[in-house]
Structure formats: structure tokens, C-alpha cells
Image (tube, rainbow, N blue to C red):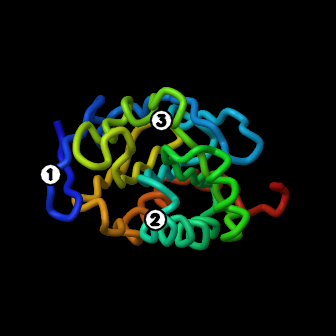
Amino acid sequence: MATVTLKGNVCNLCGTDVNVGDNAPEITVVNSAGLADKVVGGSKDKAQLIVVVPSLDTPVCAAETRKFNEKAASIAGVDTTVISMDLPFAAGKFCSAEGIENLTVASDFRNKDFAKAYGVLIADGALAGITCRAIFVVDTCGKVVYKELVPEITAEPDYDAALNAAAAAAPKSTCCGGGHCS
């Protein structure tokens, strides 16, 4: 099973190890806006940028969410979701306070189904029971085309690599240029 570190201390991860080329499991998480269910993974009409963070109540996770809110919004055909174990109410307050409007912030607090299905649940150590920091990009066919498991939980991900992978996975226009497409 995979491992990450927290300030140099090894943390084991548990769950199914999802890698590039695998089918992205369809999992229901809870949207912080209105407590509605949201399904991530599987095939969709847009590419999916799934950003996994331990808690929005930490400086690195907050900065990462703000950055993806700003940058991912400019990529057409990409649905971005930030997933943590934070309660939806706390995530909703964070979004209101930080002006997060260009992506979905969701929680896996109910059953930890997402964390287990994607192999990002921390199994031991001080952060046992929450998610590590990871990025998954899923194409419209439901295949994982990019994965970053950030080795040190307190470090930020490779934003450019994730955003470039999301842009590459986004559906391309099939317009012929004849001016009659809407």
C-alpha cells in the first residue's frame, strides 16, 4: 500500500490504489452547497479534476483550494471538485468566506467511500481517518489520466501538471467552423 509523510513521519494509506489507466470509481460525496449528493468518477460529459485535501481548515489546503478555484475556472469542459473529510457546514463557511464559486467543495465524511475507493485514506498516525493530499484527472470516458499523490502532506501539489492534464482531458469542440454550431 502507498505511503505519504507528515513532517517526515510515514503515514500508511488504505483503500484501493487507483492509478493512471484505471477506471475511476463512481462515488457519491456531499456537496457543501445545500448538502446535495454529487457523484465523482465514472464517465461524464466533462473531464473531472478531483482535488483531495486533508482539511480546508489548514493554510495549505485553503491556499490550494483558492488556487484551483482561480485557475481551473478558465479551463472549459472541466468539472473541478475539492474533496475533504470536513463537515459540509464547515466547508460551506469556508467557501463563503473565501469566495469559492468556480468549483464544488464536497465532503466524504459519511462513510469515507471516496477515500477508500481511491486509496487516499490515512490509516495511521496523527491524521488517521482523513484524506492525504492528492489529485486525480478523469477523462470523459471515466479513465484516470493523471494522478499525483503528494508525498509530503504539508506540501502543495504540482498545479501546472494537474491543470495541464485537466485541459488535455477536456472534450474538444467538434465544430466544423461553419458558423452554425451553437
Q: From what the image shows, is residue 57 above or below residue 15? A: below
Residue position marked by numbered label 2 in the rendering = 58
Quadrant of the image containing the N terminus: top left
Residue that extends furthest to the front in the rendered view of this protein:
126
**Is 4 or 136 nearer to us in this picture?**
4
Residue type pointed to by label 3: Gly
CA gap between label 3 and label 2 equals 31 Å
Q: Residue 99 location in percent, x, y?
A: 71, 70
Residue type pointed to by label 2: Thr
Secondary structure beneath label 3: loop
Residue type pointed to by label 1: Val
Residue position marked by numbered label 1 in the rendering = 10
Q: From what the image shows, is residue 45 above or below residue 78? A: above
Badge number at residue 82? none
How many residues crowd around disc 1 within 10 Å: few (fewer than 14), some, or many (20 or more)? some
Mark 3 vs 1: CB contact within 8 A: no
N-term mark: 3 or 1: 1
- Quarter-of-image position of residue 66: bottom right
Q: From what the image shows, is residue 182 above or below residue 28? A: below
**Is 152 or 162 nearer to us in this picture?**
152
Q: Residue 69 location in percent, x, y?
A: 60, 67
Q: Residue 108 location in percent, x, y?
A: 52, 37
Question: Which residue sits at x=41%, y=52%?
Answer: 54
Residue position marked by numbered label 3 in the rendering = 142
**Is 131 or 80 nearer to us in this picture?**
131
Compared across the picture, whether 109 is left or right of 130 comes to right
